[in-house]
Amino acid sequence: MTAATTAPATTYPPTQFYTYNRVLNAVIPTPDSHPNALPASAAADRALKKARAQVGEDVWKKGYSPAPGGATEVGLAALAAEGIDAAAGFFGILTGAHVSHFDATSRKTVKGPDARQKSVLPSKLMLFITRKTESGEIAREALSLELHTDFAQSVVASLSAAANGAQKMSYHPEFGDVILIDAEMTSRVSGDKTYYNERARLALNDAALGYERANPEKDVETTYVFPDIELLKAANKVEGDRYNEVQKASEAGGLGLDSKVIRDTSRIARRVFMSEAAEKVVKQLWVNGKDRISN
């Protein structure tokens, strides 16, 4: 009698998490000082701590700055010294996505139809990819973005444009597509001050492959998806309407609410709106890619 054999269990590499860092204007491995942190996260943690110590907390907290010797330049140099290419972006085969909402008290995921309203902590958009490393191994990576940020909202707007036909495309994105997300910073001058605004850039399939350094023979120009402007206009309207509502209620009731309190309330309304938009995009990705690879 032959003994039954058991097939070896499938093992997957640990997932490396990424985040957007506004000081550096780059998508980087999520910094982590835990003893069991993955090498890239530990390296990012060392680099950022070194950069902050070098420029000082006051300079670092001022955020992005293109000035020579500023926090941005020093931080990028520190990452490079640790072997992290901050310009590489988030690149690979899209395998999954979801939106999470968190309760401020328990810090646990909130579920149900009113989850967006209950979520006081920022909702998060998660995108999952796989890619082949230079050594030929398969890497699993995830980009975690808090949906109250301009960067995350521009990711949603770009995915919305591609998924829902706001931009003329010959296909709609789905799981199994090659995706690239990187960052750019725009500026405007008002008086003697310069204001910087971050924005995510999204490329798909051939356009994304043109960016891949591991395949220089793929000489394809990187063409980015133009964001869903109507979605962003709607988000602006939701925020503006909420600001006016709270301001009028404050004046009528003699509450005398500080403008920052009113602004924070209106930003929450915008975040709830964009969280809902993100959920719609994720649902469309699942519909488009139901017969292909999934996380």
Image: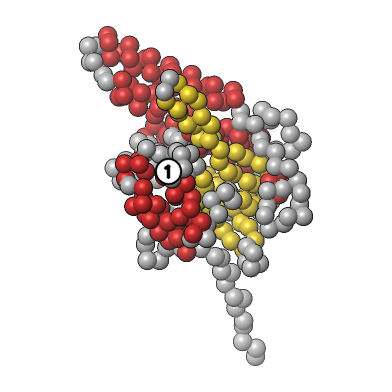
Residue at (65, 31) in percent of width and height:
226
Count of labels in the image: 1
Q: Nearer the viewer, residue 157 or 19?
A: 19
Residue at (57, 72) in percent of width and height:
9
On the image, the x and y values in percent for residue 7 come to 61, 76
Q: Quadrant of residue 269?
A: top left
Which color mode does the image show?
A: secondary structure
On the image, the x and y values in percent for residue 220 come to 75, 46
Say if 213 sits above or below 160 in the image: below
Direction from residue 74 to residue 232 in the image, left or right: right
Q: In which quarter of the image is residue 159?
A: top right
Say if 236 sits above or below 135 in the image: above
Residue at (66, 28) in percent of width and height:
166
The residue at the far top in this view is: 252
On the image, the x and y values in percent for residue 63 come to 40, 39
Q: Quadrant of residue 203?
A: top right
Q: Which of 225 and 109 is in front in this view?
A: 225
Q: Assign a secondary structure to mark 1.
A: loop
Q: Please indicate, yes or no, whether residue 30 appears anywhere in the rendered image.
A: yes
On the image, the x and y values in percent for residue 263 come to 36, 23
Direction from residue 171 to residue 79 in the image, left or right: left
Direction from residue 145 to residue 206 in the image, left or right: right
Q: Please indicate, yes or no, whether residue 146 appears anywhere in the rendered image.
A: no
Would you name the residue on which mark 1 appears?
70
Residue at (39, 29) in percent of width and height:
268
Q: Quadrant of the N terminus?
A: bottom right
Q: Residue flagged by tag 1: what amino acid is it?
A: Gly
